[in-house]
Image (tube, helix red, strand yellow):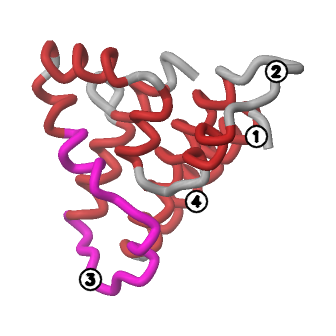
């Protein structure tokens, strides 16, 4: 997979999540929204891979995670992220909502409408969304 693939997957997962939200399938929407953020981080990580360079093994291994905090660290965007959180309290709140998502949410049977909608808003908000911020870099 390459950067363009991850960017495309991000958009696909967002569309799928919206369709699920619109049809009151909140658990699935929550799960796919988290994957959209994961794919966006991976698009940025892929962007940093130089053609013909042999990749660092630890970086490659680390990229195969669903942990958004680990992906943030691996991406090298920690300072940018800290700066955004300091200057934008709404972004900080949104990160707090999004950062603990993990792939185990696929087993959740208790995601409420409010939680799914808040999660989506934290991700796609035009001014303060996590994905909006990530797309500046990918």
Q: Which residue was labeled with disc 1?
A: 5
Tell me which label, 2 or 4, sits earlier in the chain: 4
Cα separation between marks 2 and 4: 35 Å
Foreground: disc 4 or disc 1: 1
Q: Which residue was labeled with disc 2?
A: 53
Is the residue under label 1 in contact with that under label 2 (CB below 8 Å)?
Answer: no
- Callout 2: SS: loop
> What residue is shown at x 42% (from left), y 27% (from top)?
132
> What residue is shown at x 23% (from left), y 14% (from top)?
83
Is the residue under label 3 in contact with that under label 1 (CB below 8 Å)?
Answer: no
- Callout 3: SS: loop
Q: Label 2: few (<14), some or many (≥20) within 10 Å?
A: few
Q: Would you place residue 82 above or below residue 95 in this image?
A: above
Residue 4: percent from the left, percent from the top? 75, 32
For the record, the magenta segment spans 94-114
- Callout 4: SS: helix
Q: Would you place residue 44 above or below residue 79 in this image?
A: below
Tell me which label, 3 or 4, sits earlier in the chain: 4
Foreground: disc 2 or disc 3: 2
Q: Can you tell which quarter of the image residue 29 is in?
A: bottom left
> What residue is shown at x 48% (from left), y 34% (from top)?
74
The answer to whether one can see residue 25 in this image is: yes
Q: Label 1: few (<14), some or many (≥20) within 10 Å?
A: few
Q: Can you tell which quarter of the image residue 53 is in?
A: top right
Instruction: Give me the disc on residue 71.
Output: none
Foreground: disc 3 or disc 4: 3
As for residue 103 lying within the magenta part, the answer is yes
In the picture provided, is 54 more to the left or to the right than 101? right
Cα separation between marks 2 and 1: 20 Å
């Amino acid at each position: 997979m390459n950067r363009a693939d991850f960017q495309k997957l991000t958009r696909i997962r967002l569309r799928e999540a919206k369709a699920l939200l619109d049809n009151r399938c909140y658990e699935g929407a929550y799960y796919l929204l988290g994957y959209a953020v994961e794919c966006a981080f991976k698009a940025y990580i892929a962007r940093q891979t130089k053609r013909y360079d042999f990749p660092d093994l630890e970086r490659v291994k680390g990229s195969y995670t669903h942990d958004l905090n680990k992906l943030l660290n691996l991406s090298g965007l920690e300072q940018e992220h800290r700066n955004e959180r300091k200057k934008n309290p709404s972004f900080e709140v949104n990160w707090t909502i999004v950062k603990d998502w993990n792939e185990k949410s696929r087993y959740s049977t208790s995601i409420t409408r409010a939680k799914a909608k808040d999660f989506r808003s934290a991700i796609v908000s035009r001014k303060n969304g996590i994905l909006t911020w990530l797309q500046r870099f990918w």
